[in-house]
Image (cartoon, rainbow, N blue to C red):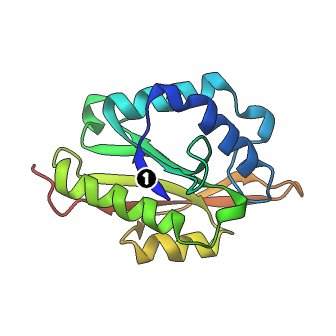
C-alpha cells in the first residue's frame, strides 16, 4: 500500500471508493446516490487549498484507491486554527487491516510536524459507533459533547452525534 496526498485528478477514483463504502451498513453517512463528482470535487478542492487529504492506493493496482481521509479549514476567520469536516473511508474489502489507523497516524503526524497553524482537528461520529469512538480516543481524540437527535437511522430511530477533538501539541498560538 502506498499513501500520498490527493490531487484534483483523483476525484473519479475517490468517487468510486466512496460509492463502494456507502454500500455497506455504517460505512459513511451519505447514501450511494448522494456521492457525486460535484460533492467529491468540493471537498478535494477545499482539502488541497486549506487542509489535508490523503489517499491509500491498492498495493497491486495503482488505479484503485482503498482509503481516503480529509479535513479542511471551515473558511471563517474565527475558525482558522482548526480542521473540520473530517471524513475517512476505507474500502470494505480492506477494513480491519489497519489502513484507517495508518491514514490517521500519518494525517495527525503531518499536522503536528508541519502544520503548526492548526491547533485542533475535529470530527463527529454516531453514538452507536462505539468501535469508532474507542478508536478515535486511542488516537488522542476527546469527546466534546453530544448533539441529540442528529442522525435518523434506516429504522427511523434517532441517535446522537458525538463531536470529538484532537489538539495539536505543536500549535503556535
Which residue is painted at 71% across and 51% down in the image?
21
Which residue is painted at 65% across and 69% down in the image?
129
Position in image of residue 14 (x %, y %): 60, 38
Looking at the image, residue 102 sits to the left or right of residue 13; the answer is left
Looking at this view, name the residue that lies furthest to the left: 172
Which residue bears the numbered disc 1? Answer: 3
Corner quadrant of residue 128 = bottom right
Disc 1 is placed on an element classified as strand
**Depth order, front residue of 123/157:** 123
Which residue is painted at 70% across and 34% down in the image?
35
Corner quadrant of residue 82 = top left
Position in image of residue 71 (x %, y %): 42, 43
Looking at the image, residue 142 sits to the left or right of residue 170; the answer is right
Residue 45 vs 61, above or below: the answer is: above
**Depth order, front residue of 171/91:** 91
Position in image of residue 66 (x %, y %): 60, 53
Residue 83 vs 165, above or below: the answer is: above
Which residue is painted at 23% across and 59% down in the image?
168
Position in image of residue 144 (x %, y %): 42, 64
Amino acid at each position: 500500500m502506498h499513501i500520498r496526498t490527493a490531487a484534483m485528478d483523483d476525484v473519479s477514483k475517490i468517487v468510486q471508493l466512496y460509492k463502494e463504502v456507502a454500500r455497506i451498513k455504517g460505512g459513511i453517512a451519505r447514501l450511494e446516490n448522494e456521492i457525486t463528482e460535484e460533492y467529491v470535487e468540493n471537498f478535494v478542492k477545499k482539502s488541497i487549498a486549506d487542509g489535508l487529504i490523503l489517499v491509500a492506493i491498492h498495493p497491486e493496482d495503482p488505479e484503485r484507491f482503498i482509503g481516503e481521509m480529509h479535513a479542511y479549514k471551515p473558511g471563517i476567520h474565527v475558525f482558522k486554527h482548526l480542521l473540520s469536516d473530517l471524513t475517512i473511508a476505507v474500502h470494505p474489502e480492506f477494513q480491519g487491516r489497519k489502513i484507517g489507523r495508518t491514514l490517521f497516524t500519518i494525517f495527525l503526524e503531518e499536522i503536528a510536524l508541519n502544520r503548526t497553524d492548526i491547533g485542533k482537528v475535529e470530527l463527529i461520529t454516531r453514538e452507536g459507533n462505539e468501535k469508532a469512538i474507542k478508536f478515535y480516543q486511542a488516537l488522542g481524540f476527546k469527546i466534546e459533547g453530544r448533539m441529540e437527535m442528529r442522525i435518523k437511522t434506516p429504522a427511523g430511530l434517532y441517535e446522537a452525534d458525538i463531536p470529538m477533538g484532537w489538539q495539536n501539541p505543536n500549535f503556535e498560538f
